[in-house]
Image: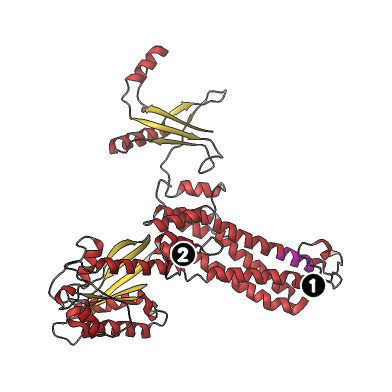
């Protein structure tokens, strides 16, 4: 039962003594009201936590909130009549909720699974439309259903295998088993792996397809890092300010102004992107370079190495040196870290700035460089070419989280979802699914060794089932819960 009513809230601990019931009511009306609020009641188990809940929807001023909370706190020290026949007075046990306590109670009462709790946490901190949509799709339980179905299949196979271990000489064992596909039931149980192995093999293939997603769900949840690199005075900080729409970085004609990495969050087509303005990169032996600028260049190289997309800004009036500096940075960082995304040159975009200072503009630039890398001529002063560059940058971000080079904002989430309609969004999920897949691979090797490896093969099925159970919260997740609920706000 759900009920909603508009009520005037009073402090119940205020004095309201009278000689009669009428006088008591008059005194009650003379109290100073706290607020006029919407009061909602939810009877368990049909509530968020599964318990009886009363919600007070008050106005948000500090005076109202402080007054209501103070009144609720004072109830803890006041005895009120009991509804029982003994009419003994009791005290209400009221206290502020701990961070995430409402969600924790919902989990404890089976209203939410662990994956849904994580999705709720993602929804609360979502910055972009695609992050919100992905969190809501996780919250509806599709990932839990996928992993739960896999685990159920494993448990069936495990139960069948353990039955063979215990009753291997029972000729009638396979006669009515759902895993029997018509194989010989008079072989003393040796057909057990013949009936289960194809199902387990198909299950492992489904897991591997699920894992082969280029971490798209995690990229969408955590966001992309876009590093702006180039020589000093190429216009990196000017580009950052232009894209951010505010003066986030100091702009100066003096080289080496930017020393540390300046971060700005952008929403590119629904993808959360952190734009990084870095120190200009040049030879350390050049005139005017000091130890502070050298440290800034080291940080610029680290930012480039960890970025998902590189924007190389080049001064169009000094094209050769600018391109050489960016190419050298990418080459050095790629050689130092073979796993770096810089090895994929498709994730590198060149911006040829100061187009307004070049005679002939883009025609003159194109005649000076023959590289096939994507390049965009812009002017941070006049904003010429910025829209085309921003459109391409947005397309690049969408393609990384969807795996589709021709994706747009409307179809990006469909590509992220994958064939099962669910996607991995946390490293914890990936780690456990990978462990489950590895266990099934070992099972396939052991299943061909007959009764000698029967126990070990069954143990691999049990291990795979356990790993999937840790994702959904069915097994041993207390340490995960402690960290997860600590990150929630008080209201959840």
Q: Position of residue 172 (x, y in %)?
A: 86, 64
| Residue contact at pointers 2 and 1, CB within 8 angstroms | no
SS at mark 2 in the image: helix
Nearer to me, 192 or 35 = 192
Identify residue for label 1: 191
The residue sitting at the bottom extreme is: 285
Residue 299 in view in this figure? no
Q: Which mark is residue 346?
A: none
Rendered residue at 45%/69% (across/down): 404
Q: Which class describes the residues within 10 Å of circle 2: few (<14), some (14-19), or many (20+)?
A: many
Q: Is residue 101 above or below residue 89?
A: below
In the image: residue 193, left or right of residue 311: right
* Residue 480 shows in the view: yes
Give the answer, above or below, for where 322 lies relative to 175. Answer: below
Q: Position of residue 329 (x, y in %)?
A: 29, 82
For the point 46% across and 47% down, the residue is 101
Q: Residue at x 30, y 78 (%)?
A: 301
Residue stretch in magenta? 157-165
Seen from the viewer's position, the closer of residues 135 and 409 is 409
Q: Position of residue 132 (x, y in %)?
A: 42, 55
Q: Quadrant of residue 470?
A: bottom right
Residue designated by label 2: 217
Which quadrant does the N terminus fall into? top right
| Rendered location of residue 91, percent (x, y) | 46, 32
Q: Measure how far apart labels 2 and 1 are at the Cα level.
A: 40 Å
Q: Residue at x 71, y 65 (%)?
A: 157
Q: Splitting the image into 4 quarters, where does residue 285 fall?
A: bottom left
């Amino acid at each position: 039962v759900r009920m909603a009513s508009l009520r005037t809230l009073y402090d119940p601990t205020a004095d309201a003594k009278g000689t009669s019931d009428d006088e008591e009511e008059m005194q009650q009306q003379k109290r100073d009201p706290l607020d006029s609020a919407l009061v909602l009641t939810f009877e368990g188990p049909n509530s968020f936590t599964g318990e009886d809940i009363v919600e007070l929807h008050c106005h948000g001023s500090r005076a109202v909130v402080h007054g209501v909370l103070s009144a609720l706190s004072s109830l803890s020290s006041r005895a009120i009549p009991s509804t029982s026949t003994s009419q003994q007075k009791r005290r209400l046990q009221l206290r502020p909720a701990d961070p995430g306590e409402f969600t924790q109670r919902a989990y404890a009462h089976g209203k939410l699974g662990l994956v849904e709790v994580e999705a709720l946490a993602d929804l609360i901190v979502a910055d972009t439309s695609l992050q919100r949509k992905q969190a809501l799709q996780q919250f509806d339980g599709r990932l839990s259903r996928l992993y739960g179905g896999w685990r159920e299949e494993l448990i069936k196979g495990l139960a069948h295998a353990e039955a063979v271990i215990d009753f291997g000489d029972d000729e009638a064992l396979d006669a009515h088993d759902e895993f029997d596909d018509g194989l010989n039931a008079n072989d003393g149980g040796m057909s057990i792996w013949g009936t289960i192995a194809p199902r387990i093999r198909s299950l492992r293939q489904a897991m591997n397809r699920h894992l082969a997603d280029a971490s798209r769900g995690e990229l969408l949840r955590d966001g992309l890092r876009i590093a702006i690199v180039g020589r000093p005075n190429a216009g990196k900080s000017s580009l950052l300010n232009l894209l951010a729409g505010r003066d986030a970085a100091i702009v100066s004609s003096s080289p080496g102004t930017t020393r540390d990495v300046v971060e700005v969050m952008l929403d590119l087509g629904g993808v959360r992107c952190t734009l990084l303005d870095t120190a200009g990169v040049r030879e350390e032996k050049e005139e005017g370079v000091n130890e502070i600028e050298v440290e800034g260049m080291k940080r610029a190289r680290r930012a480039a190495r960890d970025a998902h997309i590189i924007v190389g800004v080049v001064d169009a009036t000094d094209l050769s040196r600018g391109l050489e500096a960016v190419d050298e940075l990418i080459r050095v960082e790629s050689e130092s870290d073979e796993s770096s995304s810089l090895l994929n040159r498709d994730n590198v975009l060149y911006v040829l700035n100061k187009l307004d200072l070049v005679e002939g503009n883009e025609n003159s630039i194109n005649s000076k460089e023959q590289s096939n890398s994507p390049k965009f001529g812009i002017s941070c002063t006049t904003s010429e070419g910025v829209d085309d560059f921003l459109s391409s940058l947005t397309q690049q971000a969408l393609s990384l989280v969807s795996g589709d080079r021709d994706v747009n904002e409307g179809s990006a989430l469909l590509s992220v979802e994958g064939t099962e309609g669910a996607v991995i969004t946390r490293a914890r999920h990936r780690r456990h699914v990978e462990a489950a897949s590895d266990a099934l691979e070992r099972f396939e090797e052991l299943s061909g060794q007959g009764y000698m490896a029967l126990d070990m093969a069954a143990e691999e099925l049990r291990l795979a089932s356990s790993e999937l159970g840790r994702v959904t919260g069915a097994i041993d997740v207390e340490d995960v819960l402690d960290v997860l609920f600590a990150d929630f706000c008080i209201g959840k």
